[in-house]
Every structure is written in structure tokens, then in C-alpha cells.
Amino acid sequence: MNRPLRVLFVTPEAVPFAKTGGLADVAGALPKFLQPLGCELKMVMPYYRMVKESGLPLRYLAMEMDVPIGDEMLRAEIYQAELKEGIPVYFIGRPEFYDREYLYSTPKGDYFDNAERFIFFSRAAIILCQRIGFSPEVIHHHEWQTGLVPAYLRSIYREDPLFSRTAIVFTIHNIAYQGIFKKEKFSLTGLPGEMYNPEGIEFWERINLMKAGIVYADAITTVSQKYSEEIQTPEYGYGLEGILRKRREDLYGILNGVDYQEWDPSHDPHLIARYSPEDLSGKRACKKDLIKEFNLSPSLEHSPLLGMISRLADQKGFDLLAEILDELFTLDVGFVLLGTGEEKYQILFTEVARKYPKKAGVRIAYDNRLAHKIEAGADLFLMPSKYEPCGLNQIYSLKYGTIPVVRATGGLDDTIVNYDPATKRGNGFKFSRYDPKEFLDQIKAAIGFYYRPEHWGQLQRNAMEADFSWERSAGAYLQLYRRVMEKKGLSS
Ligand code: ADP
């Protein structure tokens, strides 16, 4: 089939325009890799202040749209940029909604009008298609902020021929954030009243926008196979496990890719030295440089150096780490952490750095350059997450020959294979139970192999050989698009 497949991406964020998390990396990368596979892509996202101030070339389209919200018609301005040649990104502008310091929440909590902001956005994305005359064969929309898109297409826009041959794929990047609002907000959507019921958008007498995506999309994906299974259980499903189990035939896990142009020690401009699996001497230079960066004891050069880069959030397992830190520092190890987030963890780790000034380095910041230096300079990378839909840092770590110690959850479980000294297979260390002792045991196991070069060298080679490029993931998404179209009888 030679004709390109018309695909619309509807996303609340995308690199390089605006980012709060891994979703932005996916939305900014996946379209670029789908295009050469034969997709004609267009994207739509909100015109946040962050976009306006990004310094990227954007143009204002003299095309305004009126978007119904409740009884009102609200005006949207449209801006446009290119993700790359041939992939236009349309930005839905409304200063009252999006010209703000943050995307969804301030350090004090969520914006009070997130329902209005994203009901407006979801509907505007559909009206945009009408205005530009784009008839997508696939709409791929992401996270709760866009959850209403299929609800609209199945109701208000049902008769519009523009969408009569459209398959809808919804991706959940993190089910802990669902977009739950008071039921009074339902009237803002303009959706028919019957959609407000427990089989639809209602969620315990409130509305749940992620649930709308799950109920009304043709297929649902998450960012790893394991997470797609986990979210069907009460422990991980955050109340949506029942509806997901109902839709399990249409639920898929597709692992995110990573951008090896950005994350590869053989050509990483942020490093003091570059290296490859054939010659790891550059990694030793990076370790020395990292020890210097954090002003740690130079003698650590010959001891295992443990690294972490993370949002400081409960999800990431910092409570487990907190419980083992003192015991950890009785061992001959160094520890470096880069992160921003919850104040309690900022205080905790600042205190750790004070208590162990020669062994522990902590930087409370968002710093991409330092993130690269940690990936390269550390020996072990710690990710004891409570849940982890996909996780990127463990995949970067593999490429940098930095051995991950992870909890076996979500994408961590799908990407990390326990090292087996008998077969010399495996690329890291993992533990199952959310338990500090299990975590510490795996760190100790890893340290044991660190001092046995024949095993450590093998582990590093195994890790660096793994391939999680976007080409693979993009192929899987395209296959899914085709499968969904076929299932709906839409194959051309
Ligand atoms: P999540 O999306 O849950 O935050 P991921 O591991 O999927 O976790 O992705 C996190 C991304 O953000 C990675 O690219 C990581 O390097 C980056 N990152 C997180 N915290 C920081 C920080 N403080 N400084 C620099 N980069 C960070």
C-alpha cells in the first residue's frame, strides 16, 4: 500500500514545545518515526506560555475558531509550527487558559479550571480538523487531557463524514492522573446526558476524562506490556481496573523507544570523554568527572558509584531508598542524585548530602547536562519505583553501560533482565516486592559483581547492546493502527 495513512496526534505536550514528563518525549518522537513508515501526520496541542516562550519558529494562522463550552462559544486562536518537515503542529491558543507559568498545576496544586481547559482543548482539536478539512484515518490521542475526543466523535460529530472512517487509539502514559472533576462540569462538555453514567464518563458521581478515553476509543495502549497487565489490577489501576478488564481485548502494551541521537555515549556532547562497548576507558574519565562535579572523595573512583535522576515523587520509591540509606553508606559506595519535586524529599536528600559529604552528592534541579553526566559516570542506576509505566532512565542507563537496579514493575520489568552468572545473560538486577530489604539485597548483589571484572564487563556489554530505538516502537504502533482499522472494517 503506497498511499500515506493520515494520522492526527492529539497531545497535551510534546518535545520540543512543552514538557512535564515522558509523554512529551513520546509525542515529540513517535510522529517522526511514523512518517518514514508511510504516515501523513498532523499534531495538535495547546498554545501554552512555555510554547510561546520556547523561541521556536511559530506562525500565527489568521484562522480563529469558536468552540462551544457549556452555553458559551469561546474563541480559539491557532498557531502553527513544524515538528519536522512535513509534520505540522497546530497550537490551540486561548490566553485565559494556557498563558500560564505551568502546564497543569503549580507547586500548590492543580489549576482550578483544568476541566474547562481540557474540555475546550479536546473539542477544539476536532473543530480544527473541520476547519482545515483534514479527515484522519487514525486519531491517536494521549492522556486524560484528551480523553473526551472519542466521546465527541461518537456523539456530536458522529454524522460528520470527515470522521466516518476514523479509528481512534488512546494511549495511557500514567493512570494515576485521570482528570477527575465535579459532575457539574459535565454540562460544559455538551455531550448527550446518557454518556454520564457508570458505563460512560461517570466515576463515582464525578466525571473522569481518562475513563472517557478508555470507554470510547477503539483501542487503548499503554507504554509497556507489563503495565498494561498491572493496570487491570486494583493495586495499579487507581479505580479504572474494572473498565480496563472489560476492554482487555482492545488493550495493548507498546514499549516507548528512546532517542539514541540524544542518549548515546559514543557521541554525547555533554561528556568529558566518549566511549563505546569496545573501549570503556572514556567511562572511567566520566566517572572521575562526575565525582569532581559533586566534590566527592576522589577515592570513590575505585568504588561503586550509584546514580539516580528522577522526579522526587512517591511513585519513584524514595521511601524505600530512605530506609536503606544509612546501611548503604556503611558500604564503600558513592551516591549521586539529581531531581526536583516534593519538598519532603528535597529536605531528606539535602540532609543526606550534609551527613555524608564525601560520599553523597545531591543536586535539587532540573539539569539535562548533569543528567547525561550521571548516566555516563555512575556504575549503577537505581529505580526502585512503586510503579513505572515505561521509564526512560533505565533504558538510557543500559546504553551507557550503567547497570540498573530496579523494581520489577511496568516497563522496568519489561526492559531489565536479571543477571545470571551461570549463563552470563542479563543486563541488570531487579526485585519484586516493594520492600527495602529486597532493594538493598539487589544493590549488594550488583556490588558483588562490580568487583568481578569478568562478570561486570559482560553485564556492561549485554546492557550496551540492547536496542530500544523508536523504529521498533513506531512499527508496532503502525501495525496496531492497521489492526484497529481492519477490525472496524476501515481497511483501504
Ligand atoms: P517520568 O516520565 O515518570 O518522570 P521517565 O523515566 O519516563 O520518568 O522520564 C523522565 C525523563 O525526565 C528522563 O528523560 C529523565 O532524564 C528526565 N529527568 C527527570 N528529572 C530530571 C532532572 N531533575 N534533571 C534532568 N532530567 C530529568
Image: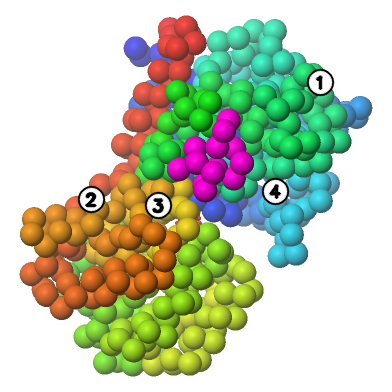
Q: Secondary structure at mark 1?
A: helix
Disc 4 is placed on an element classified as loop
Give x and y (percent) for residue 87: 51, 32
Residue 174 left/right relative to 146: left
Specify the amino acid type for callout 3.
Answer: Thr
Tell me the tag on residue 466: 2
Q: Which residue is mark 3?
A: 409
Q: Secondary structure at mark 2?
A: loop
Residue at the disc numbered 1: 193
**First reached walking from the N terminus: tag 3 or tag 2:** 3
Query: Residue drawn 56% across and 80% down?
Result: 348
Dot 4 or dot 1: first in sequence order is 4
Residue position for label 4: 48
Along the horizontal axis of the image, is 397 left or right of 149?
left
Q: Is residue 125 visible?
A: no
| Disc 1 from disc 3: Cα separation | 39 Å
The residue range painted magenta reads: 230-243
In the image, is residue 359 above or below residue 30? below
Hey, what amino acid is under mark 1?
Gly
Q: Earlier in the sequence, mark 1 or mark 3?
A: 1
Q: Residues within 10 Å of mark 3 (few under 14, many from 20)?
A: many
